[in-house]
């Protein structure tokens, strides 16, 4: 039995869900509210963070550690290139979106607008929201620049880097914070990855109290 403990608008959970779906690995999704610090969940992951993947008696935490396990145990279709240099580039960009983009953008927009309300941990800070809206422009332009030179973010094939980026952006798109008209490369890349079957369950997610914009689940947005 495979269970993924997740939050619908967690970009790290979405990254893992996309990888699992792309490899056609079926899992039972269990929604977890990490701010409740449920003891049974803390026993699985003392860090108290999602995602957590439980396979029988094995427990895996941290989105990148989970992905590496999935990639090694289910190598087809590959989400890391076989060429060492290209593999390093895919990992670099994955870290870019997991760390830099997340800290500069997602934490300032999604967590302020949504997570604080869900966890009842205070009110959004306008300064952080302004910083997130300012920072996202740089990252969207960087994606556009990458797509001017490549078919996918890390090269000629789709990799975990594309899923890491799409996971962050899909969460922000749910709250209408992505300007898809900023550059054509950005829009074309997201339309391409959004149309993959792996994305279907992501686009079906709904969070009570928050309604996504009309274009959110539209493949011809």
Image: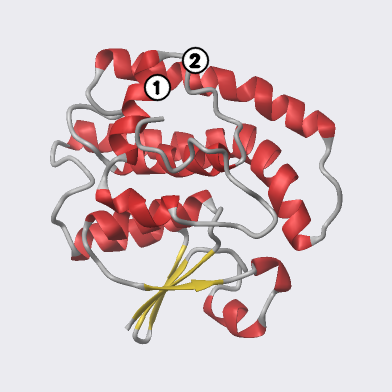
Residue 208, image quadrant: bottom right
Q: Residue furthest right?
A: 122
Which image quarter: residue 41?
Answer: bottom right
Q: Which residue is mark 2?
A: 182
161 relative to 35 in the view: left or right: left
Q: Quadrant of residue 46?
A: bottom right
Left or right of 101, for residue 198 = left
Count the marks.
2
Q: Position of residue 218 (x, y in %)?
A: 41, 38
Q: Are marks 1 and 2 in contact (CB under 8 Å)?
A: yes
At 74% from the left and 32% from the top, the residue drawn is 129
The residue identified by callout 1 is: 186
x 57%, y 19%: residue: 137
Question: Is disc 1 surrounded by few (<14), some (14 to 19) or many (20+) residues within 10 Å?
Answer: many
Q: Is residue 191 left or right of residue 217?
A: left
How many other residues sit within 10 Å of disc 2, few (<14), some (14-19) or many (≥20)? Answer: few
Q: CA distance from mark 1 to mark 2?
A: 8 Å
């Amino acid at each position: 039995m495979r269970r993924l403990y997740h939050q619908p608008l967690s970009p790290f959970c979405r990254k893992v869900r996309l990888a699992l779906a792309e490899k056609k690995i079926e899992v039972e999704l269990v929604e977890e509210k990490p701010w409740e610090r449920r003891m049974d969940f803390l026993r699985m992951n003392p860090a108290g963070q999602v995602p957590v993947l439980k396979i029988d008696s094995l427990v895996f935490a941290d989105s990148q550690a989970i992905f590496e396990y999935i990639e090694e145990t289910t190598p087809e279709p590959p989400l890391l290139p076989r060429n060492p240099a290209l593999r390093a580039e895919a990992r670099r960009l994955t870290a870019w979106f997991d760390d830099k983009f997340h800290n500069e953008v997602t934490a300032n927009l999604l967590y302020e607008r949504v997570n604080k309300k869900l966890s009842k941990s205070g009110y959004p800070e306008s300064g952080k929201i302004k910083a997130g809206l300012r920072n996202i422009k740089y990252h969207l332009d960087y994606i556009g620049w990458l797509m001017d030179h490549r078919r996918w973010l890390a090269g000629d094939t789709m990799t975990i880097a594309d899923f890491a980026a799409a996971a962050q952006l899909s969460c922000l798109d749910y709250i209408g914070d992505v300007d898809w008209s900023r550059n054509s490369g950005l829009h074309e890349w997201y339309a391409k990855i959004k149309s993959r079957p792996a994305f279907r369950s992501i686009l079906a997610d709904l969070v009570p109290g928050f309604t996504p914009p009309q274009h959110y689940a539209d493949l011809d947005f």
